[in-house]
Image (cartoon, rainbow, N blue to C red):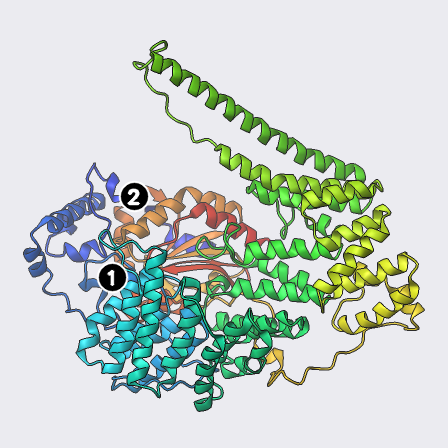
Amino acid sequence: MASEIERRSSVSVAVFGTVNELHGFVVPRCCNRVRTLTAPFPLNLLPNMNLRFLIACSLLCLLSSLPATFAMESSSNSRPHEGAHGDVNADDRATDAGHSFHGEAFNEGPRQRAVKASGMAKIHFPTSTQSDEAQQFFEQGVAQLHGFLYLEAERSFRQAAKADPELAIAYWGMAMANANNPKRARGLIDEAEQKKDKGADKREKLYIEAHARYLPKFGDDAPEDDVDAKRKRAERYIADLEKLLHEYPEDIEAKAFLVLRIWLSDREGVKLASRHAVNALLSEIFAVDPMHPAHHYRIHLWDSAHPKSALESSAKCGPSMPGVAHMWHMPGHIYSKLHRYADAAWQQEASARVDHAHIAQAGLIPDQIHNFAHNNEWLIRNLLFIGRINDAVDQAKNLVSLPQHPRYNTLKKRGSYKYGRERLLQSFTEYGLWDELIQHSGGFYLPFTSDAVQEEELLGWLAVAHFRTGKAGRGAKTLRTLIRRRIALETQLLDLADKSAAKNSKADKQESGSDDDSGKEAEPAEKAVTAEELRSHLKALRPIIARASAAGATHRKEPEKVKTLAEKAKLDALIKAQWLADAGDVESALEITKSERKKREGQVRPVAILVDLLWRNGEKDEAKKQFETLRTLAADADIDTPMLNRLRHIAKFAGVQGDWRIKREPAKDLGERPPLESLGPFRWEPNQASSWEAKLPDGTPTHSKELSGRPRLVVFYLGFGCLHCMEQLHALSPKLEAFQEAGIEIIAISTEDSETLTTGIDDFDKPISIPLIADPEHAVFKSYRCWDDFEDQPLHGTFLIDSNDRVRWQDIGYEPFMDVDFLLEESQRLLTLP
């Protein structure tokens, strides 16, 4: 922290524990501003703030226990329900600070305003609204639904509802945008149903009722949602959409959503009997609008069945809505299935660039975007198929370096970090970059982790890398470490079996009355690993040991052991072929490689290995022939990598000097492809933090530039009256020194003015040195998007900002971020990024 701020604030902030700790009182945690609820009582005359707060909470308990009629009268000054996005003053409702005034369903999702986005498809979906703004944002939301851009679709629908709070169909849109969250969708469609009789036309009501009938019920009295119930709901939804089309046969949006529903319902037990029939329905849409984003749905329709049928839609999908990354991603499915991996890689890169541009504009972190991680890991796989190994490695490293967050992206989730780690290992191992693997093991990109299976996976490959680079001693040592782990697990499993047998024997004796110790006090049960967990761990570890052992057998030139161990290891067939050849069995290696070449049509790696093995087996003419095929396949490949570099002598034999790649001519069925650079950056980069001006508790102005040059954690909290905020500061307090040792200062910015801030500071007893800053006009809150634009209230926020004033990590929400240990560890990780 800047010494000037420390000098001028020089405050000690006391942060109390949870409300439950206050003198044994148990009170609800659901206050927005306790001062607001207790305004009629002269609590400010009491000398101690903790005592004032205790009495305030007691009064809140008293109010909550009064009859409902009294509670309603006592809140008569609150504004009537104005819709989830009407203007409501934060102090007018007894709601937790940061929480929506309209229920749990509105806590999650986007809470910052939408903008009229570029690159959206033009959709015609008439509604009953009289607001041009509401209509425009509603149609933008429908377009985004078609692109599965769910976060932004919901934001657009919320903006439509902000302009017209009684527009019931906007709440239908919000429910549709929660396709992956049925519980939230249920709450949102219930809101639509409540509003549909206040002006919605017949068509809108049919849309709302169809989705309401499809979504499951929740609650203690809800029917069980088993497989049969899901199938029946899906069948009814299809029937309801067809009913809508009977009434409105020209509604191409209804046709598009019907196509989507038929495809999705195939997963819910409603067999998709005829893809051609569904394709005919799509043709009706394209007859009206040739560039309708339903091209997305045609790709899904034919992806697994007959990918060539979707080539036309693959050419039009991205251009139909260029501002949505997923629309560029989808053609990659078709090109991959057709073994056109260079075209697929182009699509995935285009998608990544659009996502990166959108993330920067919307102020998000990457894994908040639906399918972001999947798109990027698929890009890496395609890059490997075409031999762009350097870009594959860089992209995998980029995924590892992205901000982790418990909700979106951790080693245990299928987010960027896990995918990046997996694809980095895949890149190193498939292309034989063993020195690079050794170099990165235990470093930033491939650290050893607390997850035993992940750590053993890395140790196994590290042992392989040592054997493959001739360091047999080190490889054997690492292999012994893995074997010891296996023995330890097997010993634990035997010990559990002994305990179980002893327990059963004891039970038998007790049943016969020979050993009655019923009067003994039971010892507290210890949380221990189960036999099932041990077996699962062993199941994962044994192939890892087999793989490392196979590499050792390769080093010792023992081909038969390689074969046996590779089978146990479930080793990639091409790696197995290379190891067999290196162990001396080139014939078996060639047999495997020829088979894999047929299975992996269009990929660089199998052909490169085949060329090498043919040459090593003395089949030079056939090697030369296959090399000619490779020259075109490897048009984009990095030929200086070990696998391709070793083919230089074969290129010389074929009469080719220097760069032996042959440029690939673009296919003629690709459609419009803009320059990739025009779509956005290839890699995600953190945004610059907004500069700001605010005041210290004594009223002295301060500026963000005083903090530049040092990493800092900036906490946005909603005043001393917000219990959850106080709990967050209370949780941060013991970790202040650890953050400072890591070179990270902490400041907290409050919604309160300097006078209120000073009063709070003076009245608290337990000091921690967190400099507090007053932002009563909420300008700083708004510049960091810690503001609900739909309900006009502040939100909690936590930001890690580096010494170059870039936002490296963030959390904005209806509750403060509480996992301080995670935050400290992640902050240190991000700030040590190479």
In the rendered image, the vertical position of residue 26 relative to residue 64, given as above or below: above
Identify the residue shown where x is 44% and y is 86%: 284
For this rendering, which residue is in front, 226 or 776?
Answer: 226
- Helix, strand or loop at mark 2: loop
Q: Which mark is residue 659?
A: none
Residue 16 badge? 2
Image point (34%, 80%), residue name: 138
Q: Is residue 279 above or below residue 731?
A: below
**Left or right for 306, reference 188:** right
- Where 200 falls versus 771 (above or below)? below
**Disc number placed over residue 103 in the picture, else none:** 1
What residue is at 37 percent from the left and 87 percent from the top? 124
Mark 2 residue type? Phe
**Closest to the observer: 573 or 636?**
573
Residue 127, x across and y down, in percent: 28, 84
- For the image shown, how many numbered marks are present on the structure? 2
In the rendered image, which quarter is residue 131 located in?
bottom left
Q: Is residue 795 visible?
A: no
Rendered-image quadrant of the C terminus:
bottom right
Q: Position of residue 717 (x, y in %)?
A: 34, 57
Please, which residue is most extreme toward the front here?
A: 273
Q: For mark 1, give the secondary structure.
A: loop
747 or 639: nearer the viewer: 639
Q: Nearer the viewer, mark 1 or mark 2?
A: 1
In this view, 32 is above or below 78 = above
Q: Is residue 745 left or right of residue 429?
A: left
Choose top left, top right, bottom left or bottom right for residue 649. bottom right
Q: Residues within 10 Å of mark 2 (few under 14, many from 20)?
A: some
Image location of residue 142, percent across then percent down: 38, 78
| Distance (Cα) linking label 1 and label 2 | 28 Å
